[in-house]
């Protein structure tokens, strides 16, 4: 009988979901819609949320997407109605999250690769501003170690998504725009870092951007696409304790930017030697930027 009632109400149910402002739902969302519309659709009380979800999937318009995050992280399930992109679904995984690093590079045309991992940034609740005085010994100790990498990764045959627990910036430099993919197809209206913020992020954490060679290529491809004034102002606004301006200045110079365009970064203090990335075994030293880089880079 439940199936008969659902079939009778099918046209009304599909019309209802077609008109909803969002097309990505959690199970609790579908349960709420069922509870609110049950009487109007004349469904019996014995029709459960799972019955209803199975009916919607069988209708051909609802798709179940499982994100198998490993323990101690939470496995997530989303239900997408009608046409959708996986990027639109991923943006519902964490409140306020946005695409960053290698994924933002791809959106801005800063890579010729097709990144296999999608990076989502979920900002930490606390600002996390360090009150400790920066010392050369402290920098050496921290940067000579291998960098910690997020293990909050869900992987299937269709996608691989990594959630980064990022610095609390109050979503500084995050935009929302329609994104066109490499094949010319729409990926949806998405939240991601603007190009200047992206260039900073990939310099800070090249591990999430394909490595230092890919970051350098990104800086080369960014020519004439961004504002140096905005980049410098963004770096100042983000307030990193470590002197990442030395890293960014090096990338820009190595990428062939005019010497005069780097003056804004030279105004930042250069009081310490720094490192292009974590855990380098053999290095060369770039005196102008007081920077250790991988040997032969």
Image (spheres, rainbow, N blue to C red):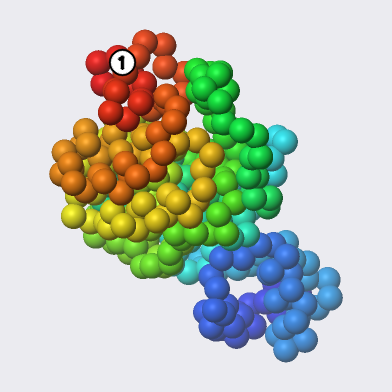
Q: Locate residue 6 relative to residue 275 in the image: left or right.
A: right
Q: Locate residue 257 relative to residue 219 in the image: left or right.
A: left
Give the image quarter of residue 24: bottom right
Q: In which quadrant will I find the C terminus?
A: top left
Q: Which residue is mark 1?
A: 284
Residue at 83 percent across and 71 percent down: it is 46
x%, y% of residue 241? 54, 39
For the residue pair 224 and 129, the one nearer the viewer reads as 129
**How many residues crowd mark 1 within 10 Å: few (<14), some (14–19), many (20+)?**
few
Which residue occupies the extreme top position in the image? 282
Q: Is residue 59 visible?
A: yes
Give the image quarter of residue 214: top left
For residue 32, above or below residue 54: below
Residue at 38 percent across and 49 percent down: it is 198
x%, y% of residue 152? 60, 38
For residue 21, above or below residue 262: below
For residue 12, above or below residue 255: below
Give the image quarter of residue 74: top right
x%, y% of residue 139? 52, 24
For the residue pair 294 and 288, the one nearer the viewer reads as 288
For residue 180, above or below residue 136: below
x%, y% of residue 75? 67, 45
């Amino acid at each position: 009988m439940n199936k008969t009632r659902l079939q009778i109400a099918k046209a009304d149910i599909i019309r209802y979901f077609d008109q909803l402002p969002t097309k990505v739902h959690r199970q609790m969302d579908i349960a709420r819609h069922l509870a609110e519309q049950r009487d109007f659709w004349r469904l019996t009380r014995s029709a459960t949320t799972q019955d209803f979800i199975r009916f919607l999937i069988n209708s051909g318009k609802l798709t179940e997407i499982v994100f198998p995050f490993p323990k101690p992280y939470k496995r997530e399930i989303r239900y997408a109605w009608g046409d959708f992109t996986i990027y639109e679904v991923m943006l519902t995984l964490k409140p306020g999250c946005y695409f960053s690093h290698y994924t933002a590079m791809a959106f801005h045309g800063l890579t010729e690769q097709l990144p296999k991992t999608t990076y989502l940034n979920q900002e930490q609740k606390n600002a996390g501003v360090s009150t400790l005085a920066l010392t050369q010994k402290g920098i050496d100790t921290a940067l000579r170690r291998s960098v910690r990498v997020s293990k909050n990764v869900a992987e299937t045959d269709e996608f691989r998504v990594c959630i980064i627990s990022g610095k609390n910036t109050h979503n500084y430099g995050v935009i929302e725009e329609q994104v066109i993919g490499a094949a010319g197809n729409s990926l949806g209206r998405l939240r991601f870092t603007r190009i200047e913020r992206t260039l900073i992020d990939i310099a800070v954490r090249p591990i999430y951007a394909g490595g230092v060679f890919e970051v350098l290529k990104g800086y080369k491809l960014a020519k004439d696409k961004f504002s140096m004034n905005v980049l410098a102002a963004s770096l100042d606004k983000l307030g990193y304790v470590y002197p990442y301006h030395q890293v960014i200045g090096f990338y820009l110079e190595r990428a062939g930017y005019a010497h005069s365009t780097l003056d804004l970064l030279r105004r930042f203090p250069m009081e310490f030697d720094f490192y292009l990335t974590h855990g380098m075994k053999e290095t060369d030293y770039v005196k102008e930027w007081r920077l250790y880089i991988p040997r032969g880079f």
